[in-house]
Every structure is written in structure tokens, then in C-alpha cells.
């Protein structure tokens, strides 16, 4: 009796858990009895992935923030590495979390275990030096966006662009009215969604600026309503504290929800932290202001390494500025409230600029619809069939 294929797999973030679960389903279309072992979140675990530790233990970001967790992260890596080397999987799939997964993949590849990395690290943003480490770590890179493949081709690293699952999942119809009804908002309300991020550090840095700019915007337009998604109990507690300290806890114009997609869909404008949510807002055809503010030490490092003119995904995908970005010191209460006013005016006037941006959003969406999970699984199957 043939033993079932056994895949090593590690995801370290909620977004990675979503990608991992969809990939497990797609791989089981080819290998129905396949087993999955490593680290996954609740969605992956529900599909039978054996997670050796809680995925939350890998959820760190930046250059400086992980240092305090380094001993624990190193132990997790050593334990997984030993388990995979002692009982080699058919292949190892690292989903995003490059700081952890690329190091693990390097050691596994040295032991002739095939390695796949799903979601390209931002080598295109920080210069080519990191590409050599990636070449030593992976047998196949799966990217979400077409602009990411060039640097891998230049360095003879096998790469496949599979598109983004969100582009497959989100349709072209506008469900804004249904989302407003779900959230108790009227069709005629002027609604701004505030998304200061999901991590505590992001909310701490962006939340006060977002709320102060909202209050300032209300002074000029008292009819505005603000909806704030909170991703989990801790984020809700943190946002409640910010609302309380700003004197607006319980104020009718501010509403919390646990549904970020509905909040964005219901909004006339989204004010948000840079990240994957900007892609979702673009796919929902929502004008946005993208904000980016890191811890001072992390920003000092990033700003010296950054090689691209934009941080917002819609701008990177378009190769030009479609949406405004307010980065680090440029993000102030005054600059943000001014940008909110500008964006709302453009919409109200039906400006050519607004229409052109919406058209670009549509074209990018169509280009990213590639049946991502099935494409990723097919690329992995193809790799396994090569000698």
C-alpha cells in the first residue's frame, strides 16, 4: 500500500492561514489522502493540519519587534527542523512569514527536502541582496502579483505567479447597499471606514491620528459617520480605550464592527494602514487613503533600504500613484483631515480623476484573477513530478 504524501507546511499569520487552508483543499484535489504537518491556524487545523505550536507564536513584524521573542522563535524553528529532517516530508511549503520560513527552508533544502515558498518576500522593495539567500532556500517561489516575478527570473530561481485569492473571491458587483443595511447605515449616509491595522503596535501608532482627523473632519461636515472594524477582542479593547481617551466613546457618529469587509464595502472612503487590506479595498472599488507609520527604529532601517516609490499595493500594482499615501512624518492630523476632505469632494463632484482610478482598480482586479489556490497546487504538483 502506497503511503500518502506528507507535506510540511508553516503559516505564521491570519492571512497565511487563509492561504494555507485554500492550498490544502487544492492539493487534496490531486492527492486526496495527503497529510499536512507543521504550524497552521484554525482554518488549516480544521482541515487536518497537525500544528505543533499555536500559529500566534509566529505573529511578529518588523526588524526590531521580533528580537524580544528570538529565543522562543529559534526553539520552534529547531524543533520543526529536527522533526522534518528525521521524517522528511514530500515537500515543505512555507507560507509568507519570510523571517522564519526562509531560514527553515534553507536548512531543509540542504537535506534534499524540496521547498516551496508561497508569497514573495519584498525583495523587489529592498534591493536584490536578499535574493541570493532566497535562491539557497527555495526550489519554487509562488508569487501573488505579476510585478514580483522579474527579479526571480533574473536570478534563475523557479517562480510562478498564481494571482491573489482575494481577486478570485471578490466579484465585480457592488454590495455597498447590502453592507450598509447589515451595519444599520442609510443609503444617503456619508461613511468613512477607519482601519488602523490589526496589530497592537499599528493601532497604537495610527489609531490616535485617525480618530483626531475624524473629529476634525466632523467639525467641517457634521453629517459624516465613521465605522471602525476591530479584528478580535484585544483590538476592540484597544480601540475602545482610544475612543474613550478621545472623548467619543458612545458618540453616535462612531460605530465598531467585527466585519472589516462589510465596513469597507459600506464606506464612501477608507482610511487604512498599509497592508493586504488595501488590496481588498481596491477589489471592492473603494477610494482610500493609505497610511504607514512604523516604530522609529524600524522606520530608520526600512527607510534606508526601501527601493520603491510606493508602499500601497494599488500603487505598486499600477506602477504609479492611484491612491494617496501618508508615510511616517507626513502622517499628521492636519494632513489626513485635509486628504479626507479632498477625496470626498472628488467623489461628490464625480471628477475624472475619481472615475479613472476606479477604472484602474477594475483592470488590476481582472489581471489578478488567476484561480490562485488551484494554480499554486498545480505548480507544486509540477515541481514534484520533475526529477
Image (cartoon, grey):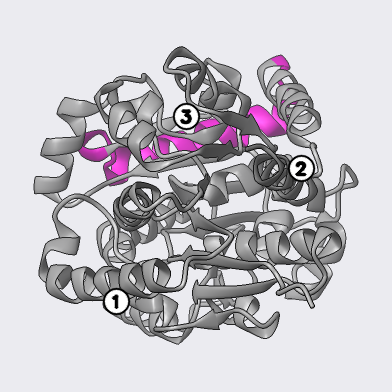
Question: Toward which corner of the image does residue 6 lie, by quadrant?
Answer: bottom right
Element under label 1? helix
For the C terminus, the image quarter is top right
Q: Secondary structure at mark 2?
A: helix
Q: Residue at x 18, y 50 (%)?
A: 63
Q: Which residues are magenta?
A: 328-352
- Assess whether residue 342 is covered by the magenta stretch: yes
Circle nearer the viewer, 1 or 2: 1
**If you read the primary sequence from the N terminus, does the residue marked by circle 3 or circle 1 appear first?**
1
Where is residue 258 drawn, in percent x and y? Answer: 60, 77
Q: Nearer the viewer, mark 3 or mark 1?
A: 1
In the rendered image, residue 253, in percent from the top left (x then y), is placed at 55, 69
Q: Earlier in the sequence, mark 3 or mark 2?
A: 3
334 versus 270 height, above or below: above
Residue matched to label 1:
79
For disc 1, the neighbor class at 10 Å (few under 14, some 14 to 19, many from 20) is: few
Instruction: State the image coordinates of residue 334 (x, y, percent, origin top left).
Output: 30, 40
Q: CA distance from mark 3 to mark 1?
A: 44 Å
Measured in 3D between alpha carbons, the distance from the residue under mark 3 to the one under mark 2, in whole angstroms, is 32 Å
- What count of labels does the image hold? 3
Label 2 sits on residue: 375
Q: Is residue 197 left or right of residue 287?
A: left
Label 3 Cα neighbours within 10 Å, binned few <14 / some 14-19 / many ≥20: some
Q: CA distance from mark 1 to mark 2?
A: 31 Å
Q: Does residue 284 show up?
A: no
Q: Name the front one of labels 3 and 2.
A: 2
The residue that label 3 is drawn on is 324
Depicted 254 relative to depicted 146: above or below:
below
Amino acid at each position: 500500500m502506497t503511503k500518502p504524501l506528507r507535506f510540511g507546511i508553516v503559516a505564521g499569520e491570519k492571512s497565511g492561514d487563509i492561504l494555507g487552508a485554500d492550498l490544502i483543499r487544492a492539493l487534496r484535489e490531486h492527492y486526496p489522502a495527503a497529510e499536512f504537518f507543521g504550524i497552521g491556524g484554525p482554518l488549516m487545523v480544521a482541515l487536518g493540519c497537525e500544528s505543533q505550536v499555536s500559529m500566534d507564536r509566529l505573529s511578529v513584524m518588523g526588524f526590531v519587534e521580533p528580537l524580544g521573542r528570538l529565543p522562543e522563535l529559534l526553539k520552534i524553528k529547531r524543533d520543526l527542523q529536527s522533526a522534518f529532517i528525521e521524517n522528511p516530508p514530500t515537500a515543505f511549503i512555507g507560507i509568507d512569514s519570510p523571517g522564519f520560513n526562509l531560514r527553515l527552508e534553507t536548512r531543509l533544502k540542504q537535506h534534499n527536502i524540496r521547498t516551496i515558498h508561497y508569497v514573495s518576500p519584498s525583495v523587489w522593495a529592498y534591493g536584490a541582496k536578499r535574493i541570493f539567500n532566497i535562491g539557497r532556500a527555495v526550489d519554487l517561489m509562488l508569487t501573488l502579483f505579476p510585478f514580483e516575478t522579474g527579479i526571480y527570473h533574473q536570478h534563475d530561481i523557479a517562480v510562478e505567479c498564481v494571482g491573489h485569492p482575494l481577486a478570485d473571491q471578490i466579484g465585480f458587483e457592488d454590495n455597498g447597499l447590502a453592507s450598509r443595511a447589515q451595519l444599520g447605515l442609510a443609503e444617503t449616509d456619508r461613511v468613512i471606514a477607519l482601519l488602523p491595522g490589526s496589530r497592537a503596535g499599528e493601532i497604537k501608532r495610527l489609531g490616535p491620528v485617525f480618530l483626531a482627523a475624524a473629529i476634525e473632519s466632523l467639525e467641517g461636515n457634521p453629517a459624516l459617520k465613521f465605522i471602525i472594524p476591530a479584528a478580535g477582542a484585544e483590538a476592540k479593547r484597544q480601540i475602545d480605550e482610544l475612543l474613550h481617551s478621545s472623548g467619543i466613546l458612545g458618540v453616535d457618529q462612531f460605530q465598531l464592527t467585527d466585519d472589516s469587509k462589510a465596513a469597507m464595502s459600506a464606506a464612501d472612503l477608507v482610511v487604512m494602514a498599509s497592508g493586504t487590506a488595501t488590496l481588498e479595498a481596491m477589489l471592492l472599488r473603494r477610494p482610500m487613503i493609505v497610511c504607514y507609520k512604523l516604530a522609529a527604529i524600524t522606520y530608520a532601517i526600512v527607510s534606508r533600504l526601501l527601493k520603491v516609490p510606493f508602499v500601497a499595493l494599488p500603487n505598486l500594482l499600477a506602477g504609479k500613484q492611484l491612491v494617496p499615501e501618508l508615510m511616517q512624518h507626513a502622517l499628521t492630523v492636519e494632513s489626513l483631515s485635509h486628504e479626507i476632505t479632498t477625496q470626498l469632494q472628488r467623489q461628490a463632484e464625480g471628477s475624472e480623476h475619481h472615475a479613472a482610478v476606479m477604472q484602474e482598480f477594475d483592470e488590476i482586479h481582472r489581471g489578478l484573477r488567476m484561480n490562485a489556490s488551484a494554480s499554486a497546487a498545480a505548480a507544486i504538483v509540477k515541481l514534484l513530478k520533475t526529477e
